[in-house]
Image (cartoon, coloured by chain):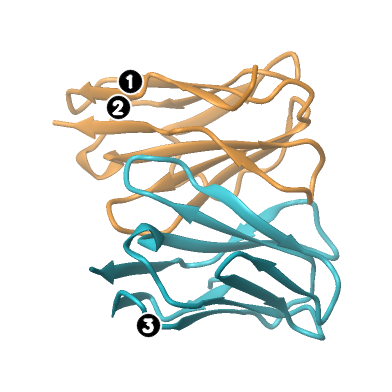
Amino acid sequence: TQLLEQSPQFLSIQEGENLTVYCNSSSVFSSLQWYRQEPGEGPVLLVTVVTGGEVKKLKRLTFQFGDARKDSSLHITAAQPGDTGLYLCAGALVTGNQFYFGTGTSLTVIP
Amino acid sequence: GAGVSQSPSNKVTEKGKDVELRCDPISGHTALYWYRQRLGQGLEFLIYFQGNSAPDKSGLPSDRFSAERTGESVSTLTIQRTQQEDSAVYLCASSQQPNTEAFFGQGTRLTVV
């Protein structure tokens, strides 16, 4: 079973639209990261959230960590074709030392 | 080095041959991870190193897969008697300590023909 479930798995939207990607778990994480992966590249870290309820903004991207530290969301405002890629959440359990990656959300922004 | 380096970047091999994939992590990073990514899919965990030890190798898909790390630095993932289903991108990542942000290499694209 997958520890971190992402939804939706695939998303295709028009340029200028807003979207939200969700990362959910029944486990508690000490921190959670979001990565973006472009074709032919390794994933690149976008943000780390640590505190329950924390909100971080990175230009048009807004990341939120759930109050109970079991889930997170990524909201993109006015999506652009350059946002196209695979978005991955990842986290470290409170009780462990290993990263767990989510199932991934493949985003396509159509010009 | 400045980032995580993997070699080779591409490898085409014949079914049944053995292959070795190399990962040079960021200097000083104690944790190292190997993942497999099939086309259009997410990351599949293979193995995690803390120093030269592998506390979790539960993701290795079969006994044809093995990995080692030496000098708390370079890691090698070996696939013996490769099969076509082994074709994928193999990604390596390192982090300064367990539970901190992971930084990825570009991956090795393995094609078994």
Residue A3 appears in the figure: no
Chain letter for the residue marked with disc 2 in the picture: B
Spatial separation of the CA atoms under disc 1 and disc 3: 48 Å
CB-based contact (under 8 Å), mark 1 and mark 2: yes
Q: Give x and y (percent) for residue A74.
A: 57, 75
Say which residue label 2 marks: B81
Q: Do the dots labelled 2 and 3 sit on one chain?
A: no
Q: Give x and y (percent) for residue B81.
A: 30, 27
Dot 3 falls on a residue whose secondary structure is loop
Say which residue label 3 marks: A17
Mark 2 crowdedness (10 Å alpha carbons): few <14, some 14-19, many ≥20: some
Query: Relative to B42, is B100 on the left or the right?
Result: right
The number of numbered badges drawn on the structure is 3
- The residue lying toward the viewer, choosing from B78 and A36, is A36
Badge 1 or badge 2: first in the primary sequence:
1
Residue drawn at x 74%, y 13% is: B71
Spatial separation of the CA atoms under disc 1 and disc 2: 5 Å
Say which residue label 1 marks: B18
Q: Which chain is the one coloured orange?
A: B
Which residue type carries mark 1? Asp
Quarter holding the N terminus of chain B is top right
Spatial separation of the CA atoms under disc 2 and disc 3: 48 Å
Query: Closer to the camera: disc 1 or disc 3?
Result: 3
Mark 1 crowdedness (10 Å alpha carbons): few <14, some 14-19, many ≥20: some
Q: In the rendered view, tell whether residue B35 sits above or below residue B80.
A: below
Q: In the rendered view, tell whether residue B15 sits above or below residue B56.
A: above
Dot 1 falls on a residue whose secondary structure is loop
| Extreme residue toward the top, this view | B71
Chain letter for the residue marked with disc 3 in the picture: A
Q: Look at the image and give the colour of chain A.
A: cyan
Q: Give x and y (percent) for residue A81.
A: 32, 63
